[in-house]
Image: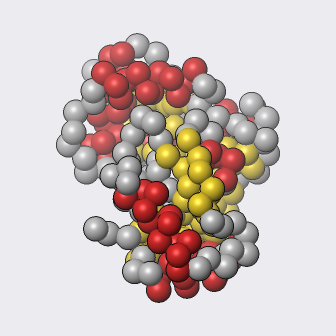
Amino acid sequence: MRRAAAAGRTTEQVGPFLATFSAESTSPFLNYAIPDDGALPTRSEVDALTAAYRERDLLPRLEFLAATAPAAETALRDAGYTVERRVPVMLCPPGAVTPPPAPAGIELVVPESDVDLIAMITAQREAFGETEAPTAADVEHSRAWLVKGGLSVYAREIGTGEPVGGGVAEAVVDGTAEVAGIGVREPFRRRGVGAAITARLTADLHELGARTVFLTPAGHVEQRLYAGVGYRPTEDILHLSLPA
């Protein structure tokens, strides 16, 4: 997870924390820290981590496997950090993907044109309740993602070309990659689109040599969806942040 988080981002070791920063986005999901295994952070080290994000106008935030650094969770919570969520990391090893039936009337493609990239980003944002329209910088970032080895899958309606949803995966690093951003617009949900996108990305990562493919579900509904594709829960991942 540290390798995946560091890929394509600036990193800084702050005490027993690996802090990562995205040059392209202020999203808290792309700017977060991970404690070292068995970390025993002091209050001053936690404060230094907080300052590293505050001085960049970013939300101080962490994502890590709870069992790897239980003392870090205690120190962070004592400093005012709150738990956003605690969910299982899910893994899908090579050969475990269970492809779902193809969603009727929906095609999955790799977005290549600006039109496709804009449509995919718009669909994903709508799926996650975001209203901000994609910018030229967003399109460039998505294109750079593909150039660096990341994967993107765009779902659209065959007859009309209407955007349906999308998903992405990190580039494979040392046999490991993360699937993320699986989003389907409300009118197209419960038709197997999310499962199809997840299975496609996972199978593609396996073909590229990934031995460990992981994701984190947003909730129980998503966990059941990913389990149907072949993912199984392992350790809990903890997301903490310090509101302003």
**How many numbered marks, from 0 up?**
0
Please report the residue visible at 52 percent of the width from the left and 28 percent of the height from the top: 145
Between residue 103 and residue 215, name the one nearer to us.
215
Is residue 52 left or right of 227 when viewed as pictured? left
Task: Report whether 229 appears left or right of 153.
Answer: right
Regarding residue 200, the answer to whether it shows in the image is: no
* Quarter that holds the C terminus: bottom left
Dividing the picture into quadrants, the one containing residue 236 is bottom right
> Measured along the vertical axis of the image, is residue 48 above or below residue 204?
below
Counting from the top left corner in percent of width and height, residue 54 is at 37, 58
Query: Residue at horizontal 45%, vertical 27%?
Result: 142
Residue 154: percent from left, percent from top = 44, 29
- In the figure, 142 relative to 225: above or below? above
Q: Does residue 124 lie above or below 150 as drawn?
A: below
Residue at the location (62% across, 39% down)?
A: 7
Task: Identify which residue, 139 or 161, lies in the foreground.
Answer: 139
Q: Position of residue 83 (x, y in %)?
A: 44, 76
Q: Quadrant of the N terminus?
A: bottom right
**In this view of the protein, can residue 4 be seen by the observer?**
yes
Judge whether 87 appears above or below 217 on screen. Answer: below
Does residue 117 appear to the left or right of 33 in the view shown?
left
User: What is the basis of the colouring in this image?
Assistant: secondary structure
Instruction: Estimate the x, y position of residue 224 in percent, counting from the top left.
Output: 52, 63
